[in-house]
Image (spheres, rainbow, N blue to C red):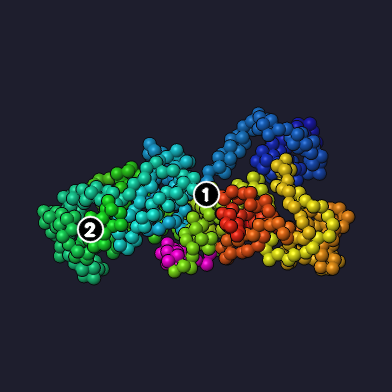
Amino acid sequence: MDDDLRERIEREAEVAALFNALKHDSDAQVGAIMGPLMGENPEFREHGDEIPGIISPVINRVNGLSAEEKRERLAELAPEQVEELEAEDEEDDQPLPDLPNVEAYDEVRMRMAPNPNGPWHLGSARMPSVIGTYKEMYDGWMLCRFDDTDPETKRPDLGAYDEILDAIDYLGFEPDEVVKASDRVETYYEYARELIEKGGAYTCTCSGEEFSDLKNDAEPCPHRDKDVETTLEEFESMVDGDYSSGEIVLRVRTDIEHKNPALRDWVAFRMVDTPHPREEAAEYRCWPMLDFQSGIDDHLFGITHIIRGIDLQDSAKRQGFVYDYFDWEYPEVLHWGHVQIDAYDVKMSTSTIKELIAEGELDGWDDPRAPTVASLRRRGIRGEAIVDAMTELGTSTSNVDLAMSSIYANNRELIDDETDRAFFVRDGVEKTLLGGPEVAEPPLHPDHEDRGTRDIPVGGAVLVEPEDVPPNGKRIWLKGLGPVRHTRDAFEFTTDDLDIVREEGVDVVHWVPADDNVPVRMRTMEGDVSGQAEPGLADYEPDEVLQFERVGFIRVDRHDEEETVTYFAHP
């Protein structure tokens, strides 16, 4: 091998090692470098036996550099590879795909449009998670518009407005503006009048069944050619409440022969006898349908991008007729599939959860058995963990499965390092303690000795879980206390050291004092679990999160007179 070839091999190996080390944030290895090196330089292959010995010192030299030095050196040798790394870093940091046609707008403006017919189930968290993340990605603007113009079928729950805003805040976002559609009915009336004047709408007194038959046959309704003046008159009577539910509607004049019957002369306004629960809107009887109301608002608020369910594809097409009459540009639209979660026995449905609460089957929206945002919050799961899991699902048109394990993994990463440990024993078996120290001193956190220890007064007996009781004559290691042998139905201290754990596989188990402990009720998705915790649990404030060792993370809910109530978050 001549000197020129050797220098080429060393140079190419250095570039490959620098790129590999920076990409994977770890030391480069000879084996990982050899493959790409030979693949990209076929002329090196005949010297394959010699190359490992040539590149090994180069790789060792690269591994001795700091990350900054590696990047600087790579920029000298192959600046295009630094650009590739930066592009990959940017892509990795971006949680969602790019929105379409962003460059056509001065500002990305998006909206979430919750129906306040109840607090949010877990699937509802996807919309604020994704839209809020897009707002952050593009330094955009976000509207929260309560679509509450159906006082009957999806009757608003007066408490849900604030509960939904609290949920958005818990997830880590703040809308730039919050409006209620029921406050904007007069605006919808104004645009209905203008649409009528443009020849884009007519009043219809056909029964639902009659119109359906005509529509399906692509036949016009007999009222379709009604003149503008009559239509305006009748619409004003609708606004004045002169009609009852089902007597009359205002229809958008579309294409009665359209290939999709759902788009043929759809209803824009109807009469509803049931008063709206909000006092400010209780007098209205003529209410816009969602497609009309949201279409008008999306334009007036300058919405540039809409995300909606795949089952609402017809909404954009219906609204398109209105936009054409007004000569408006329709926003960009993304459709996505539904989120499915199978970890709960309770159906992810607002009406179902309401029924179960009313029947006493669930304690409330924050019952740990309910698939709701409030439930996860009460369990001590951070909103950020939910947002990360939701954005990981992307914006696919396919239905997607949300694994609760992904939320748990995200939350564990957020809280593990800062969370104190404690012992909690279920179905405790009492064992007399023979010998040993009077006080146990397990660490507050196994990875942070500097945080100190928890002092647990031992007393004359301990409680352990039934499966942790060893056979007579066998040993276990009581965590933070020491080794004991199960002898004559008691635990007798031995003089063994930790080698029995490391080398002999003796189990390390958690425990609590039999006398000085805190009765605990731990609420879980499967039901309540009772047990005893170490006495220090009483010192933690409600809302603080701990890890019950060998059990999982919990949130302290409250200290009652007879017990402390905690909520199980996840393993």
Q: Is residue 481 left or right of residue 354?
A: right
Q: In the image, which residues are magenta?
A: 344-358
Q: Is residue 205 left or right of residue 530?
A: left
Instruction: Please check the rendered image and state whether residue 350 is part of the magenta-colored stretch, yes or no.
Output: yes
* Dot 2 or dot 1, earlier in sequence: 2
Could you say where residue 250 lies in the image, as x and y percent from the top left? Answer: 20, 58
Could you say where residue 408 lies in the image, as x and y percent from the top left? Answer: 59, 54
- Label 2 secondary element: loop
Is residue 139 in sight in this rendering? Answer: yes
Instruction: Name the residue carrying label 2.
Output: 285
> 402 or 103: which is nearer to us?
402
Could you say where residue 558 lies in the image, as x and y percent from the top left? Answer: 56, 54
Q: Residue furthest right?
A: 495
Instruction: Name the residue carrying label 1.
Output: 383
Decide: few, some or many residues near mark 2? Use Cα within 10 Å; few <14, some 14-19, many ≥20: many
Badge number at residue 340:
none
Instruction: Please check the rendered image and state whether residue 315 is part of the magenta-colored stretch, yes or no.
Output: no
- Label 1 secondary element: helix
